[in-house]
Each structure stands twice: as C-alpha cells, then as structure tokens.
Image (cartoon, rainbow, N blue to C red):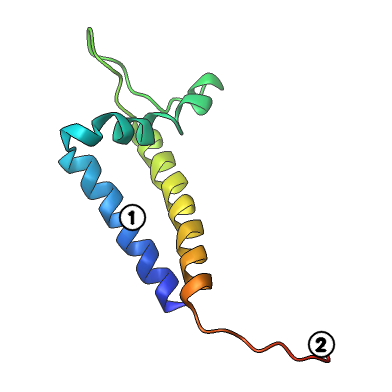
Amino acid sequence: MRIRWMAWGVMMVLHFLALWGLPDELAPALAGSVYLPLMPLRALGLPVLSAAPSGGWAGPSVLGWAVVAMVWALIWWGVASLIARVTGPRRRVSPLA
C-alpha cells in the first residue's frame, strides 16, 4: 500500500508543478489537462470557469480547480494502483480457495 501512496503523491506533485512551471513544449497538453475535465461540466451549466477577460480564455473558478484536482487525483490513483499491482509482492493463492 505504501508504494501506491508514494507513486500517487509523486505523480500529483509532478503534474501540478508542470502546471505552474508550464514548459512551452507541453503547454497545449497541460492546458488540455485543465480544460478538458471542465468542458462537460460547463455544458451542464456548472460555474467551473470564471469570467473571461476581454480577448482571452476564462480561467477555472475555485470550483473548477477543485474539480480538476479531484479528476487528476482519481486518474493518478488508478495509475498508482496499477504500478503497485505490477511491482508489489505476489500473494499466494490457496489451491483450495
């Protein structure tokens, strides 16, 4: 279980550091990682985007950032679970079970 938490924490930290560092080469993918989870919720009428400045993109609202954090926390938890399952100790299965 410890490897799952460690892998999840590392992936979350790296994702959010990339968002704030925003390397130019990764900018479209990182912007998509923020806006793609929000678009279906915006279509449903939830206020996940704040008011757009003139001629610019609307940034996520507080609710939007919370949704983005929860979506990516769940995605990275799934990845960490797969990593833990592959690298973790093997359990013996009883032949009578």
For mark 1, what is the residue?
12
Which residue is depicted at the point 51% across and 64% down? 82
Which residue is depicted at the point 41% across and 75% down? 3
Image disc number at residue 35: none
Which residue is depicted at the point 45% across and 63% down? 80
Give the answer, above or below, for where 29 lies relative to 81: above
Which residue is depicted at the point 48% across and 23% down? 42
Residue 73 rendering spot, x and y as whole percentages:
43, 52
Query: What kind of residue is marked 1?
Result: Met
Residue at the top extreme, as displayed: 55
Tell me the quarter of the picture where residue 67 sits: top left
Residue 21 rendering spot, x and y as whole percentages:
16, 42
Query: What kind of residue is marked 2?
Result: Ala
Give the answer, above or below, for where 86 lies relative to 60: below
Query: How many numbered marks appear?
Result: 2
Image disc number at residue 97: 2
Give the answer, above or below, for where 57 lies relative to 92: above
Secondary structure of the residue carrying numbered label 2: loop
Measured Cα–Cα span from mark 1 to mark 2 = 38 Å
Of the residues tagged 1 and 2, which is closer to the observer? 2
Q: Quadrant of the C terminus?
A: bottom right
Tell me the quarter of the picture where residue 57 sits: top left
Q: Are marks 1 and 2 in contact (CB under 8 Å)?
A: no
Of 64 and 8, nearer the camera is: 8
Residue 62 rendering spot, x and y as whole percentages:
34, 36
Q: Is 57 on the left-hand or right-hand side of 3?
A: left
Secondary structure of the residue carrying numbered label 1: helix
Residue 10 rendering spot, x and y as whole percentages:
30, 62
Of 38 and 1, nearer the camera is: 1
